[in-house]
Amino acid sequence: GIQVEQSPPDLILQEGANSTLRCNFSDSVNNLQWFHQNPWGQLINLFYIPSGTKQNGRLSATTVATERYSLLYISSSQTTDSGVYFCAGGRGGGADGLTFGKGTHLIIQP
Amino acid sequence: ETGVTQSPTHLIKTRGQQVTLRCSSQSGHNTVSWYQQALGQGPQFIFQYYREEENGRGNFPPRFSGLQFPNYSSELNVNALELDDSALYLCATEDRRSGNTIYFGEGSWLTVV
């Protein structure tokens, strides 16, 4: 099956800082998504981005499908950005589900 | 707000017992998947239902089973509970008619003692 590697595993930043989170895939995927999990366990979909670049406010993501990696950028971090960020990928029609990485645990300090 | 509701939010069961977890989603989300998330790990795919039939399954034994109903609600059943089944169980829905964005519920925290 697909292997998903995320880096860094942990990241501590001051409020206002920028960060880049990376996700590498062992095989090509045609369904790639980024999620943010808050301390209560809720997973919020940030981007559906199998290729190209998307932006949503202070967050943006870029996927280079030919090189099997994706990047999530967070600018001007706020304390509410704290939590765990997961990338997940899948193939085909989705019946195999998404394979998640182990996540990047981000802490934004005031 | 993802429009996906799960119940119960927390529960404690004894090894060997059976548990049923429930999920309801917005109308139109015709695909539902269940994931298991152990502490400190990413979610793992259990299975997926589309139009009330299982159409995909991860590496989980048959004692994990499910149902999807015509109103798009869904159940996850786990028989013969083991201590390692303690985890957060997440329901995810998507509307294939409008892309592949997946929406997760808040999860059910299961503790097996």
Image: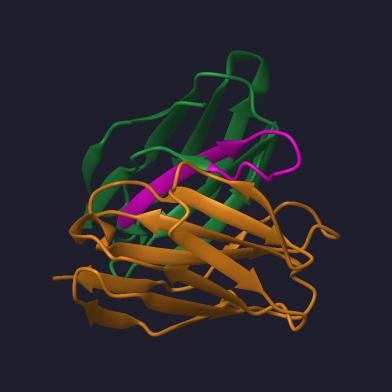
Question: Which stretch did the figure color magenta?
Answer: A83-98
Nearest the viewer among A76 and A23 is A23
Q: Colour of chain A?
A: green
Which corner quadrant of the image does residue A57 belong to?
bottom right
Where residue A93 sits: x, y (%)?
A: 76, 42
Compared to residue B51, the image places residue A100 above or below, namely above
Position of residue B24 in the picture relative to residue B97 (left or right): left
Residue furthest toward the right?
B97
Instruction: Please tell me whether residue A22 belongs to the stretch shown in magenta.
Output: no
Q: Position of residue A19 (x, y in %)?
A: 37, 39
Can residue A74 be seen at all in this image of the molecule? no
Q: Quick check: A28 left or right of A102?
A: right
Q: Residue farthest to the top?
A: A67
Please give the count of numbered marks on the rendered protein: 0
Q: Residue furthest left?
A: B113
Q: Is residue B56 visible?
A: yes
Q: Is residue A9 left or right of residue B78?
A: left
Residue drawn at 28 percent across, 75 percent down: B17
In the picture shown, does residue B68 fall above or below A72?
below
In percent of width and height, residue A58 lies at: 51, 53
* Left or right of B28 on screen, residue B61: left
| Residue at 79% from the left image edge and 66% from the top image edge | B51
Rendered position, A31 above or below A36:
above
In x, y percent, where is residue A99? 50, 39
Q: Nearer the viewer, residue A28 or B23?
A: B23
Q: Which chain is orange?
A: B
Residue located 22% across and 79% down the image: B12
> The C terminus of chain A is located in which quarter?
bottom left
Residue at the location (67% across, 33% down)? Answer: A91
